[in-house]
Amino acid sequence: MKNKYYKFLDLGYQPLANQFLSKKDLLKKEKKYRLSVGLNKSNFLVSIKDTFTSKEMFDENYPYRSSMSKSVSTSFKKLSRQIKKKFKCKKILEIGSNDGTFMKYFNKKNIIGIEPCKNVEKITKNKKFKTYPLYWNDKTCQFLKKKYGEFDLIFSANTLSHIKDLGNVFKNISKILSEKGILIIEDPSLLDCLKKNAYDQFYNEHIYVFSCISLNEILKKNNLEIFKIENIELAGGSIRYYIKKTQNKLKIDKSFKIQINKELKFGLKKISTYQKFSKRVIESKNKLKEIFNNLKKKNKKIIGYGATAKSTTVLNYCRIDHNLIDYFVDTTPGKQNKYTPGTKIKIKKYEKEIKKDVDFVFLGAWNFKKEIFLKEKKFIKRGGKFITHVPFPKII
Ligand code: TMP
């Protein structure tokens, strides 16, 4: 089993990506793990090596809220319209419903959500939606099946790739999905990640970064298969997979084959592709550090924009800390007045615009670059510049 796993990337010791620190935590020793990434040579699944349990990562202090990003809301709204039009389903389950950003576009009678982080689950429940503070596992599946029967649509965005036992995840989905039922999942795309050198897709919560090739291998073992995909911009480049039961005779859309061919052409089945990626990541680290050090030598004021889980990986890997970035701004209440994990940079509330004394802004939320540039026209007009590491470190 062990020699099936080929380790190709070492991102050093990292704290948990969403473990933002309060002031009193600053002097305490943080929990760290070695973030290394590898490829399973038999099913081409890319995963991180050392993992944490769901309970350690997703609890009542979880800060992430889907509703904080306009692009996420807009995308879910569009998808909800398509679902209503195409699938006409009456019973929908969302796995990892967060603060109800997707659920809110459906009739309360038709949708049920499960979300283990009680703090965000409560937000949806307070809006009178039916949600349960549960992890997706055997027990939850049995409970839901007994109470509600089978579902004709299951949706899950950025959740299933966070659960270690994928075989079990899909075995249970297969059990609770009706014969003609559809599973729609969205997760970061490995092809996009490698093309963009977005090594920050790797952190403790992202146990897996799926490709169409690897996901279909796992699904097949559980009587499921992809019948259509859409490339979407969210989360730095994701794939929305449309999945059906194998016996469902729905036609396989050409988008599936096109994506598989793209992945094969890029070399997702070749070890050398991952070795080259790893080299590019090291180059990216050196270049980014050089940019920061040069600007600091010139006494430039640099802040961060969007204290993302992804930026935890970048900052800790490149050792960019509170000496180089004055502070971060972020719209998420649970992150404000806290400090970035490992690098201890203060996170301030985003106040309408970037302050006048700021020269450079590091894009922690590079995946929302378009949204941010639109919002920060004033900063750009007065000569303010952004720093990004994707696809290569540069000043924009
Ligand atoms: P994500 O990349 O994991 O979705 O996280 C995005 C983070 O960036 C989230 O904490 C909200 C924050 N953010 C801002 O502070 N301002 C913005 O304009 C956007 C789009 C995101």
Image (spheres, helix red, strand yellow):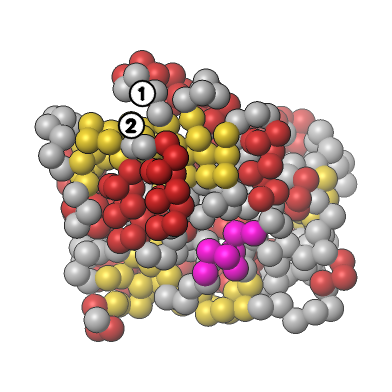
* The magenta segment: 53-59
Q: Amino acid at mark 1?
A: Cys
User: Residue 309 at what x, y percent from top left?
Assistant: 61, 57
Give residue 385's mark. Answer: none
Contact (CB < 8 A) between labels 1 and 2? yes
User: Residue 300 at what x, y percent from top left?
Assistant: 80, 57
> For mark 1, what is the residue?
89
> For mark 2, what is the residue?
152
Q: In the displayed structure, does residue 112 sit left or right of residue 121?
A: left
Above or below, comparing residue 305 to residue 342 in the picture: above
- Among the 4 quarters of the image, the one containing residue 82: top left
Q: Quadrant of the N terminus?
A: bottom left
Q: In the displayed structure, does residue 131 sit left or right of residue 340?
A: left
- Number of numbered discs on residues: 2
Q: Quadrant of the C terminus?
A: top right
- Among the 4 quarters of the image, the one containing residue 233: top left
Can you see residue 136?
A: yes
Can you see residue 282?
A: no
